[in-house]
Amino acid sequence: MLEREFERLYYKFRENYCKNLFSSVKEGSLSATDSYCLEVIFLLKRPSVNEFAEYVNISLPNASYRINNLINKGYVRKIKSEYDRREYHLEVTDKFLERYGANASFNNKLMSRIRENFSEEEITSLEDMIKRIVDELMD
């Protein structure tokens, strides 16, 4: 059944994400909340402080506190907006990207297995389906 298989796929990705998330928490440098905030900043691709606060549904002072904490730990930097010098955009640092590489490693292994076990036609079909699914998820 499609629903069950899709759920299994989703849970495998989540399982890998949680494994990586909590390995960073074990290191002591990041809390689980810090890790989620970093993930949001990364996925939003240089959000403003306001955009970040709105997205995670927290107050601006709370967002500023969390951001400053991540800046002090070396995971985030603020970049002045080119258009409005009063506004800052958030950008993850190389320190985050190195930690995030564990997810990339999982994805690379998966892609290698797909290329080994699927025909070119199946891979092309899978790519097309994934593109369509992602388009369906867009707001």
Image: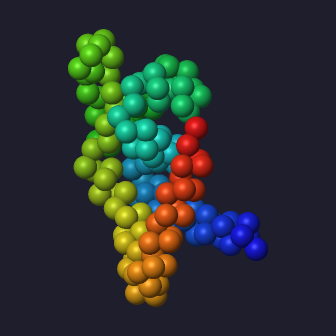
Residue sitting at 39 percent across and 43 percent down?
A: 42
- In the rendered view, would you say 28 is above or below 59? below
Say which quarter of the image contains residue 105: bottom left
Please state the horizontal and vertical placement of residue 27, each as a whole percent of the image. 41, 58
The quadrant of the image that shows the N terminus is: bottom right
Residue sitting at 54 percent across and 31 percent down?
A: 55
Give the left or right position of residue 55, taking residue 116 as reference: right
Specify how the rendered protein is coloured.
Answer: rainbow
Query: Looking at the image, which residue sits at the far bottom?
Result: 117
Query: Looking at the image, which residue sits at the far right?
Result: 1
Please state the horizontal and vertical placement of residue 138, each as a whole percent of the image. 55, 43
Please state the horizontal and vertical placement of residue 79, each as a whole percent of the image. 26, 27
Residue 72 seen in the figure: no
- In the rendered view, would you say 61 is above or below 104? above
Residue sitting at 33 percent across and 17 percent down?
A: 87
Give the left or right position of residue 42, taking residue 15 as reference: left
Instruction: Please name whichever residue, 27 or 4, is drawn nearer the observer in this view of the structure.
Output: 4
